[in-house]
């Protein structure tokens, strides 16, 4: 009987964690500014992070359910970060955002050194 309750608790916990890490798949229009697309893209990356990643990686990139990302750009380049976002890694599921959103988030995170 204990194993049934333990299994139920595990399933519920995993469901809550996955729901918290997920986000909206709706992409928002990227705003442009007079300084060029790079600043707008970084801003879009931060906005997408807030929508889709904050549940596991924290408001200030400090980690929680997922690893600390405050200096992730010093550890991985933009392409590797994008690959991790798209394909998942460890407990992080894949395909939480579309490819365009993954690229914007990776660009923003790659600047965190």
Image (cartoon, rainbow, N blue to C red):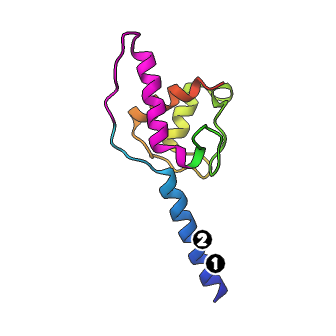
The numbered mark at residue 6 is: 1
Residue 24 in the image: above or below residue 16: above
Q: How many marks?
A: 2
Q: Is residue 59 left or right of residue 45?
A: right
Residue 91 in the image: above or below residue 106: below
Q: Residue at x 39, y 39 (%)?
A: 98
Q: As rendered, which of 93 and 10 lies closer to the eye?
A: 10
Magenta stretch containing residue 29, yes or no? yes
Q: Are marks 1 and 2 in contact (CB under 8 Å)?
A: yes
Which quadrant holds the N terminus? Answer: bottom right
Q: Residue at x 31, y 30 (%)?
A: 29
Q: Main secondary structure of the magenta part?
A: helix
Q: Residue at x 36, y 45 (%)?
A: 25
Which quadrant holds the C terminus? Answer: top right
Residue 1 in the image: above or below residue 25: below
Q: Residue furthest front?
A: 59
- On the image, numbered disc 2 is attached to which residue? 10
Question: Element at badge 1?
Answer: helix
Q: Is residue 13 left or right of residue 48?
A: right
Residue 19 in the image: above or below residue 27: below
Magenta stretch containing residue 37, yes or no? yes
Residue 51, percent from left and from top: 44, 42
Magenta stretch in the rendered image: 28-55
The alpha-carbon separation of the residues under discs 1 and 2 comes to 6 Å
Q: Is residue 33 left or right of residue 87?
A: left
Residue 109, percent from left and from top: 56, 29
């Amino acid at each position: 009987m204990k194993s049934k309750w333990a299994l139920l608790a595990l399933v519920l916990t995993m469901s809550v964690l996955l729901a918290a890490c997920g986000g909206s798949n709706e992409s928002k229009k990227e705003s442009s500014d007079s300084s060029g697309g790079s600043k707008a893209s970084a801003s879009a990356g931060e906005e997408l992070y807030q929508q889709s990643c904050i549940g596991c990686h924290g408001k200030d990139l400090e980690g929680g359910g997922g690893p600390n990302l405050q200096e992730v750009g010093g550890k991985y380049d933009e392409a590797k970060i994008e690959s991790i976002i798209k394909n998942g890694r460890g407990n992080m599921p894949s395909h939480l955002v579309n490819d365009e959103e993954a690229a914007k988030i990776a660009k923003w995170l790659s600047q965190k050194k």
